[in-house]
Amino acid sequence: MNLILQAYPLDNNITEENQQYNEYLNFIDNTLLRLPPQTQEVFKLCRQQYKSYDEAAAILGISRHAIKKHMVRSMKVLRTAAETELGISMSILFILLSSF
């Protein structure tokens, strides 16, 4: 019984961390929904699938410069949303996500 009680706070803490992580991911997903579909796709390719700008450009059939413009737009929207809605910088948001 003692072993179960000792393990409970750890399990509970992990659950809270997972919940917080999922909330941050949902925040990013919901924020990205405000963007045009092409910008959403560019963000997913570059940030979630780790494609280079050149690879994303080849996949989407657009220029590398267009990829860069889409990424600048998406990062600006995410930065503004993180600051106004979460009260944290986007850098902190990405650090928090990478720490899970």
Image: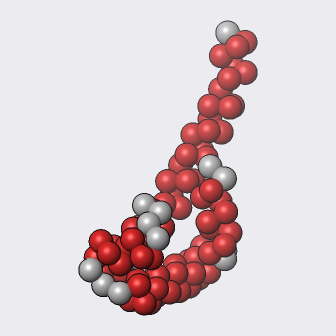
Q: In this view, does 84 lie above or below 93?
A: below
Q: Is residue 86 visible?
A: yes
Q: In this view, does 29 lie above or below 60?
A: above
For this view, does 19 lie left or right of residue 60? right
Q: Where is residue 14 in the image (x, y as percent from the top left)?
A: 62, 38
- Residue at the (53%, 61%) spot, across then down: 24
For residue 53, what is the image quadrant? bottom left
> Viewer-proximal residue, 99 or 46?
46
> Viewer-proximal residue, 95 or 86?
95
> Viewer-proximal residue, 82 or 69?
69
Quarter that holds the N terminus: top right
For residue 97, what is the image quadrant? bottom right
For this view, does 51 lie left or right of residue 97? left
- Residue at the (65%, 26%) spot, across then down: 8
Q: Position of residue 44 (x, y in %)?
A: 40, 68
> Viewer-proximal residue, 34 or 43?
43
Q: Where is residue 27 in the image (x, y as percent from the top left)?
A: 48, 67
Q: Where is residue 11 in the image (x, y as percent from the top left)?
A: 62, 31
- Residue at the (69%, 31%) spot, across then down: 9
- Residue at the (62%, 49%) spot, across then down: 100
